[in-house]
Amino acid sequence: MFTAAALALLVTVALALVRALAGPTVFDRAQAANTIGTVAMLLLAVIGFLTGRPDFLDLAIVYGLLNVVGTIAVLKFFRYGDLGEPGDETTTR
Amino acid sequence: MSALIDVASWVLLLAGGAFCMIGGLGLVRMPDFFTRMHAASVTDTLGAGLMLLGLMLQAGFSLVTVKLIVVGLLIFFTSPTATHALAQAALARGLQPLLAPQEEEDA
């Protein structure tokens, strides 16, 4: 049953990867990357149960923290064009 | 009793996987960026919640359940934050919703 859940999560990752490759704007790609991060957390938890090693949950927690920090950093870069002070909105692509 | 908990956990896991796939499908099929964001929130809330609940039923009362609750709280707090920042950044860059009226924009 954990195998079915892991397969469903892998299908979700594949669908998000399609959107990340075909996304017209950079925000579509950021959204797809965020979804892939969330699903990767769940996949780490499910794989921990699948292999009988629940230590994978620590990896899931660390991955979630890195995921949210990365998403916020990418969004700040594409909103302000800089990771430092919030200046005027430049038109970086 | 143990078999009942097992069946409930399987049902929750399968429902969580189904909702995750529905969210991914919406991420591919929706026509607009903001509707795609709306579809992706299904994966973050209902899919993740049901799947973590199923894993908690499988783990019982132990440290593993505490870690699962921490993962759930992490998703619960960071996913709306990321979605909010995403919508703010998209609106600041001038990305309009597909069906928005042209003069008044209040997302």
Image (tube, rainbow, N blue to C red):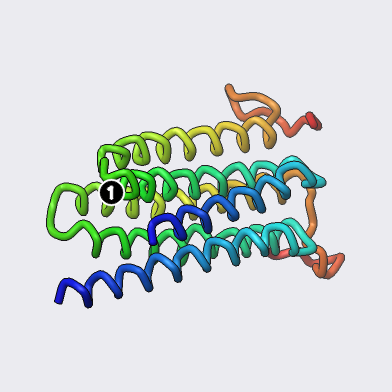
Residue nearest the observer in this picture, A54 or A36: A54
The answer to which quarter of the image holds residue B33 is bottom right
- Image-based side of B59 in relation to B43, left or right: left
Residue B17 is situated, as x and y percent measured from the top left of the image, at: 48, 63
Is residue A47 among what the camera can see?
yes
Q: Residues within 10 Å of mark 1 (few under 14, many from 20)?
A: some
Quadrant where the N terminus of chain B lies?
Answer: bottom left
Residue A54 is situated, as x and y percent measured from the top left of the image, at: 26, 43
Residue nearest the observer in this picture, A28 or B18: B18
Residue nearest the observer in this picture, B56 or B35: B56
Q: Mark 1: which secondary structure?
A: helix
Residue A74 is situated, as x and y percent measured from the top left of the image, at: 61, 33
Q: Does residue B33 lie above or below A87 as drawn?
A: below
- Image-based side of A11 in relation to A80, left or right: left
Q: Which residue is mark 1?
A: B70
The amino acid sitting under disc 1 is Val
Residue nearest the observer in this picture, A77 or B15: B15
The residue shown at (71%, 44%) is: A20
The residue shown at (16%, 71%) is: B2
Is residue B88 among what the camera can see?
no
Quadrant where the C terminus of chain B lies?
Answer: bottom right
Residue A32 is situated, as x and y percent measured from the top left of the image, at: 64, 47
